[in-house]
Image: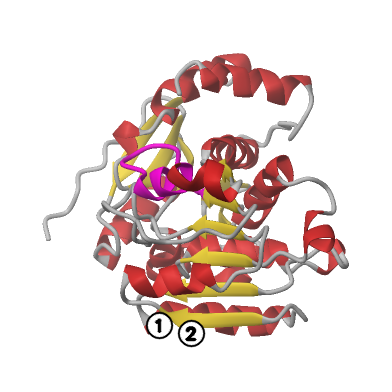
Amino acid sequence: MAAREYVKAEQPTFYFIGVTTGKSSIMKVFPEWAKYLALEDVVIKGIDFKPHDDPDAYREAVDFIKNDPLSKGALVTTHKIDLLTACRDYFEELDPYAELMGEISCISKRNGKLIGHAKDPITSGLSIEAFLPSGYWAETGAAALLLGAGGSSIAISAYLMQDSHGDNRPSKIVVTNRSQPRLDEIRHIHQQLASPIPTEYFLTPKPEDNDAAVKDLPPGSLVINATGLGKDAPGSPLTDHVEFPEKGVVWELNYRGDLVFLDQANAQQEARQLQVEDGWVYFIYGWTRVMAEVFDIDIPVSGTQFEQLSEIAGRFR
């Protein structure tokens, strides 16, 4: 494979490592956020890789960011596990979640060290707390179904399993995936967390298999599309014949793309009394937590400043 050409940054630069970064709202939002946060002269650049790309491609990108003085850090989507697997030796430090989960969503530089962070357990938790009422799990007895066993599902399940929630946790967690290795990996991570929540793992090579997992959920359950289908690849992990749980909550982690899963939920919203959420709040929390880390600044997760950042972003949705 031909090496990609990386050009030395001439001003402070923040990178977005993804698949179709140019289509993301962040390319328009970031310059406005940078002005608001007084991050003078900072620019954003996208670096696109295909899913599960050549390890050497990830190594070239991380090597460049590590050694280029004005390259400040990066947010990583889609490639969180693959990038760390390929580049672990470049990092002097990993945060505890990155160590546990074997993934990174944030690359920062501090005191000459390259540091990898897994921010998704924090940002997914903030997002869930934004759309579920306090005490939801304890009051409803609902379960959580994670469609896909990649980095997002690892992060969300780690949040849901936290001991700090006490009795306010799902009655069970179900994880499905179309290939076995990712299921084995998430099961291994859950074993390390030693959560008392009953957890089930299903190999679901066909959308009909996921439909069956959805059908078995109790009322009020949370169904999450964490597969990437709809953004990184076309389609949905479910068929149009799926039956969402009565009074359930359906969460599409993406906010852009051909969101078939979101359309399927919206089609049943009235009949099944569903609460349907997309990934917009997740987008805002995800980016602001990484920016706070990379630029070593305080960005609140609520209050006036956070609301102003949300309002700025909303102009470009």
- Residue that mark 2 sits on: 184
Q: Give x and y (percent) for residue 264.
A: 41, 49
Toward the left, the furthest residue is 2
Q: Which residue is drawn at 74% across and 78% down?
A: 197
Q: In which quarter of the image is residue 228?
A: bottom left
Question: What stretch of residues is rendered in magenta?
Answer: 252-266
Q: Do labels 1 and 2 touch, CB within 8 Å?
A: yes
Q: Residue at x 43, y 43 (%)?
A: 267
| Rendered view: 39 above or below 46 | above
Quadrant of the drawing holding the N terminus? bottom left
- Is residue 94 something that shows in the picture? no
From the viewer's perspective, is 58 left or right of 134?
A: left
- C-alpha separation, residue under disc 1 versus residue under disc 2: 5 Å
| Rendered view: 215 above or below 317 | below
Q: In which quarter of the image is residue 179?
A: bottom left
Q: Give x and y (percent) for residue 230.
A: 34, 49
- Say whether residue 263 is magenta: yes
Callout 2: SS: helix
| Rendered view: 255 above or below 144 | above
Q: Residues within 10 Å of mark 2 (few under 14, many from 20)?
A: few
Callout 1: SS: helix
Q: Residue at x 63, y 51 (%)?
A: 124
From the viewer's perspective, is 60 left or right of 195?
A: left
Q: Give x and y (percent) for residue 128.
A: 68, 48
- Say whether residue 155 is magenta: no
From the viewer's perspective, is 21 left or right of 226?
A: left
- Residue that mark 1 sits on: 181
Q: Which residue is drawn at 52% across and 58% down?
A: 244
Nearer the observer, 224 or 141: 141
- Identified by mark 1, the residue type is Pro
- Identified by mark 2, the residue type is Asp
From the viewer's perspective, is 141 left or right of 18?
A: right
